[in-house]
Amino acid sequence: MGIRTIRAALAAVAAAVLAFGVTTAADAQQKTESTWDQIKRTGKVRMGVFDYPPYYVRDKASGEWKGAMVEMGQDIAKELDVKFEAVEVGGWGEVVLALQSNKIDFHPALQATPKRATSIDFAGPIYWIEWVTVNNPKFKGKTWADYNKPEVKVAVMTGSADEVILRKMAPKATRVEMKELSQIILAVSSGRADAFTTTVLSSMIAKSKNPDLGEFVNPEPRVALPGYIGLRMEEDNRWQKFLDRWAEWNILLGYNEQRLLGSLGTAGITEIPPTVSFSPK
């Protein structure tokens, strides 16, 4: 091999090593970029949404997303002076993966269950909410003990906090797990399930739109939990600190409760039980 050939080969190797180093460094920088820096760089913040009134509602005419949580997300973007982007995810069961894969930057209305806490982080809380049940007209459950029987079928949404609550409050009930609330409502109204459990917001809307459903119940003992904002786990805590302060500010001033109550009004619910509240007791 001649000297020129050797020099050319060495130059090629050096160029390859340099290119590899630059690519690796770029990849490393991209992988370690914090959510806060990414939001500032892109000028937008991405929130997960899916059809779940009154939290997230797609306007059939415009295709735009509305709802209580969308209003909160838009306010977060406004405070940051960046663009708000609603990104559709497949439901509660897919929110964690959407956060981990950097498909979205945050997702409000999550309960900080121990299982979720092993995979994502949280900010907030942003509100408090109670779990209730809606019965089939032929079923007359009043307490969690009434549901806590193997012969009682209770429908819940897969991957949701509803499932966790049911496992805690009525572990002996036969769970009927489904992906969408519309499937759950159909199962209960048709008699394939005796009842379903979810938050008071979703239950009230489901009951108002489906006259074939039975009684709306606040089972004893009553269960209320805070709702949080889900976000990725990362060492840089600026994003989490900002969301914590945003949540504190909006709760103390009553803004988030106003948004949640307002979402019931837009859904056509004008009579709200006096026991319904979204602030800490």
Image (spheres, rainbow, N blue to C red):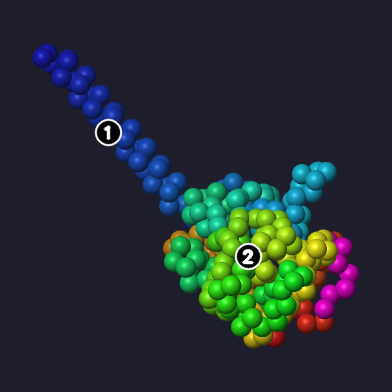
Q: Nearer the viewer, residue 178 or 141?
A: 141
Residue 188 visible in the snapshot: yes
**Amino acid type indicated by mark 2:** Ala
Q: Which residues are magenta?
A: 267-273
Residue 155 - label: 2
Q: Is residue 249 above or below residue 95?
A: below
Quadrant hosting residue 111: bottom right
Q: Position of residue 163 (x, y in %)?
A: 57, 68
**Amino acid type indicated by mark 1:** Val
> Do residues under tags 1 and 2 come within 8 Å of each other at their CB atoms?
no
Quadrant hosting residue 234: bottom left
Looking at the rendered structure, the secondary structure element under dot 1 is: helix
Q: Name the main secondary structure of what is drawn in magenta.
A: loop
The residue wearing badge 1 is 17
**At 64% across and 81% down in the image, what residue appears?**
146
Q: Marks 1 and 2: which is nearer the front?
A: 2
Residue 205 visible in the snapshot: no
Whether residue 253 appears in magenta in the rendering, the answer is no
Q: From mark 1 to mark 2, how far is it between C-alphas?
A: 58 Å
Which of the two discs, 1 and 2, labels the residue nearer the N terminus? 1
